[in-house]
Image (spheres, rainbow, N blue to C red):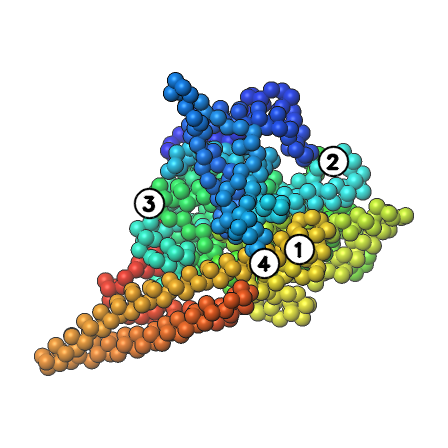
Amino acid sequence: MGENINIEKIFGSKVFTLDKMKERLPKEVFEEVLKVNQEGGELSFESAEKIATAMKEWAVENGATHYTHWFQPLTGITAEKHDSFVTHPKSDGKMLLKFSAKELIKGEPDASSFPSGGLRSTFEARGYTVWDTTSPAFIKEGGCGSILCIPTAFCSYTGEALDKKTPLLRSLEAINEQSLRIVKLFGNTEAKKVSVSVGAEQEYFLIDRKNYLKRDDLIFTGRTLFGAQPPKGQEMDDHYFGVIRERVGAFMADLNEELWKLGVTAKTQHNEVAPAQHELAPIYEEANIATDHNQIVMETMKRVAFQHGLTCLLHEKPFAKVNGSGKHNNWSLVTDNGVNLLDPGDNPNDNFQFLLVLSCIIKAVDTHADLLRQSASDVGNDLRLGAAEAPPAIMSIFLGDQLDDVVRQLVEKGEASRSIDGGMLQTGVSTLIDFEKDGTDRNRTSPFAFTGNKFEFRSVGSSDSIGSPNTILNAIVAEAFCEAADILENADDFETELHNLIKDNMAKHQRIIFNGDGYSEAWVKEAARRGLPNIKTMVDAVETLTTDKAVKLFEKFKIFTKSELESRQEILYESYVKSINIEANTMIDMVSRKFLPAGIKYSKELALTVNALDDAGVDNSVQLGILEKVSKKLSEMNKALENLISKHDKALEITDVKEKAVYIKDNVVEAMDNLRKPTDELELIVDKALWPVPTYGDMLFEV
Ligand code: ADP
Ligand code: MG
């Protein structure tokens, strides 16, 4: 692998693309597929039968032995159960491989162990996976051989969504319908569909697998729960965009090759800010496919890392005190006749469709800042959002100088007569070509930034699915579009009403716009003054899912029913409780059975030396001093350990899941921090040869 890659040849070779369907299907069946893909609707059973056969033949030719319905339950990762194409042998002993429409369309994984938040009682354990015809099937190669993966949605017997894909698909229908109303108002009657384009930049860490296997915290929780700072961190800024080291480069080359085969447009790769941190960005594509592809990217990263003796850490904060990992979700809306609704053009002040769209997005984000914040929350992201590196927990929009100026003109004067342009960039070096600058510089601290012709939602956690963030974005913008279209479709004087609406949206919601430093203390105060929500944790964010405002929004656009929202809420509380539980247990175990014993061993060595030196009549003050320090840390650790155990036991007694989550957030997390501190301090005193796990220095600088 890795040598002489012919991208054109391998790209999509493991995907059952439209092209392959065209080759293998009768013309009328293929046309039906195209129609469903473009306009929605359902395939007939007869066609599905033909597609199943063609898909199986293609898969078998490509070495597949099994198929699976590939789905995204609320655990946040993908799930699969493999079935081989094997049937009863014929009388002559020969094997006829089969795959029917029924098997393609619907699966019934005995799904009682997936989280359902009360939607599916365990005695009624039916859950169905349903073929998503809009995302192509693909062949995954791995330890199990080659498996045909069929992207599916996962729902209960009564049709409630049990996954991340179903609501996303529903939200895509909603935004399509409402966006079409908007473009029609501006005379675009040819557009039949408005799609969401998404490009998800993925950050990750790579460490040596032999170090990973020596750390229970990484194995059980995906992050380090202990670890003193190494002599060097990220302060030199020498990793970001630095030359990619050989071993990492070899990993990236194989990763790209695997992704290209799976039809993922891996495009950009570079070293990130923290040591051992890297990023991969694909080219943007339709949101549903981008979401599936992001899952594939994460899975493939883990698999290829394994093959290279590495471990890929996707946790939001694998290491304390260096940058964590996120996922920038780039989002825009584009019509099937090629208009990007978020493209301001050269003179945004004159581009009324753009201004209306922009004003609706401003309104949507301000109205539902809480939901947007929720959509990017997970346990790991609590360690990232709000710390001084990732976007803050307060949602705000960065527009940049050019648009900010247009909004200001509109709000202050009722109209915008001019747009600032970027001017020419002159380097002062005659041989470098001067070029036209963007109208806007970048702002790295904003959670939701306008970047040219798209919005970049930067709060999403690196391990999370982008399903929820995009579902929420689509839903809240669909609502604002719908409210605008309701007014404008009935306007007597369109131009005046349009002007008023744009101005109104911007004036009422301009508090959400912030172009300054999102990491500063001053912004926290200013945001509070503006009345913007500052939701600090995942547990606090979960509340926002069932406010009247949220239920109204989701029910109106048929994205979630109230009971689906309640079930999700329960699942989120549960997953928080379980995750922190595992972290606390791991800490208790590591301190009790690794770090305390290491300290005790070292103190014994010191004590023996102290006595021996004393007997010999030699100065032993250094040894005695260290012994006292070690002993002091051991007693601090022991106290903190007992405290954590008691808080943790108390949490386990609480039966109500929300109450439990809140208690854990307010008590257990702090007790964990208090145990980490003396342990990390002990690490810096104890003989390294006695320290039972690899250190930050070993993990971050050894690849
Ligand atoms: P930037 O440097 O502004 O972050 P890049 O061109 O590096 O932009 O793109 C970052 C990500 O955004 C990539 O995944 C890219 O494909 C995606 N992207 C670019 N344009 C759009 C768009 N119009 N809609 C959605 N995503 C986009
Ligand atoms: Mg980045």
Q: Secondary structure at mark 1?
A: helix
Q: Would you say the residues marked 1 and 4 are in contact, meaning their CB atoms lie under 8 Å apart?
A: no
Which amino acid type corresponds to the residue marked 4 in the rendered image?
A: Gln
Q: CA distance from mark 3 to mark 2?
A: 50 Å
Return the x and y of residue 214 as percentages of the image width and height: 31, 55
Identity of the residue furthest to the right in this view = 492
Disc 4 designates what residue? 569
Ranked by sequence position, the earlier of labels 3 and 2 is 2
x then y, percent, for residue 128? 56, 42
Question: Secondary structure beneath disc 3?
Answer: loop
- Which mark identifies residue 309? 3
Contact between labelled residues 1 and 2, with CB atoms less than 8 Å apart = no
Name the amino acid type tagged 2.
Answer: Ala
Q: Nearer the viewer, mark 4 or mark 3?
A: 4
**Residue 665 visible in image:** no
Pointer 1 or 4: first along the chain:
1
The quadrant of the rendering that contains the N terminus is: top left
Label 4 CA crowd tier, 10 Å (few <14, some 14–19, many 20+): many
Residue labelled with disc 1: 562
Callout 1: 10 Å neighbours few (<14), some, many (20+)?
some
Residue occupying the point 52% across, 35% down: 150
Q: Residue furthest top?
A: 92
